[in-house]
Image (spheres, grey):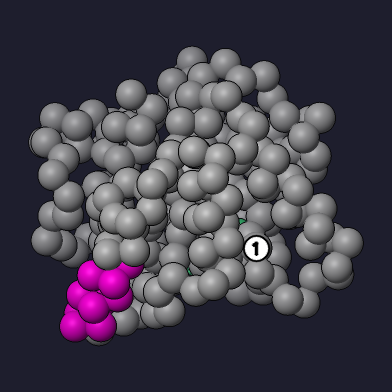
Amino acid sequence: MTDFAPQGSFDEETVEAARKLFAGPVSFLKSAPALQHLPDAVVPEVAFAGRSNVGKSSLLNALTNRNGLARTSNTPGRTQELNFFDIGQPPVFRLVDMPGYGFAKAPKDMLKQWRFLVNDFLRGRQALKRALVLIDARHGIKDVDREILEMLDKAAVSYRIVLTKADKVKATDLAAVREATETEARKRPAAHPDILATSSEGGMGIPELRAAVLEAIG
Ligand SMILES: Nc1nc2c(ncn2[C@@H]2O[C@H](COP(=O)(O)OP(=O)(O)OP(=O)(O)O)[C@@H](O)[C@H]2O)c(=O)[nH]1
Ligand SMILES: [Mg+2]
């Protein structure tokens, strides 16, 4: 793996503890197509939210270094349920892979169902310590993203913005989108002031994001 300039201000011990935790046992727990199927909330949870195709499932695989743990696809709308993954055995925390929003080709009633599922989960889950809101580094924050950011701000759900697919943009463009995104994050009440730029392909920002997850679960 290539070396990247470190991001954020995580101390070495946290980065190392996070690396170890994610390198240990990881298992798929269950898939919840509706809120009544949620698993009992027994450990802290961190959820992946973001536009369809932004790279939520890929990032989950990169963090756990397990290809194919969460299903990915070039076709938007791959993930249609809330998928829970246990990290650690016994589990220390859970990652939740969620359906994406803003997927225009999905049937209307399906879209509505996903929106309720995602919004109600994010707003009502006691065990949820933080949401990671993923933003494509090629596009930056769009209005469709702002809708979910506003919802999280209103409900006071703590979240962190994470840029994805950083390997697809030039360094100068990445620096610009990073700055614009951070400026917006700092104005949002429930957002963590720092953002992370990641690549599931190249590995940029992955150690830091692991540390950020560990930090979020406390
Ligand atoms: N180059 C590059 N491609 C990526 C990266 N992350 C994801 N992709 C690609 O983007 C596509 C979508 O990735 P997914 O992880 O399935 O996206 P998702 O957000 O889970 O999508 P939905 O489940 O539809 O909401 C796949 O073809 C991935 O291979 C990345 O960091 N770099
Ligand atoms: Mg997915």
Rendering quarter of residue 165: bottom left
Question: Would residue 16 be visible to someone looking at this image?
Answer: yes
In the rendered image, which residue does mark 1 sit on?
Answer: 101
96 or 67, which lies in front? Answer: 96
Magenta segment boundaries in residue numbering: 171-181
Residue 189 vertical placement versus 59 (above, below): above
| Residue 172 highlighted magenta (yes or no) | yes
The chief SS type of the magenta part is: helix
At 80% from the left and 70% from the top, the residue drawn is 106
Quarter of the picture containing the C terminus is: top left
218 or 55, which lies in front? Answer: 218
Q: Is residue 8 left or right of residue 213?
A: left
At 62% from the left and 49% from the top, the residue drawn is 98
Q: Is residue 23 left or right of residue 130?
A: left
Rendering quarter of residue 170: bottom left
Give coordinates of residue 108: x percent, y percent. 86, 68
Identify which amino acid the numbered label 1 is placed on. Tyr
Q: Secondary structure at mark 1?
A: loop
Rendering quarter of residue 200: bottom left
Residue 179 vertical placement versus 92 (above, below): below
- Disc 1 residue lies near ligand 1 with CB under 8 A: no
Give coordinates of residue 79: x percent, y percent. 68, 56
131 or 62, which lies in front? Answer: 131
Q: Is residue 1 left or right of residue 139?
A: left
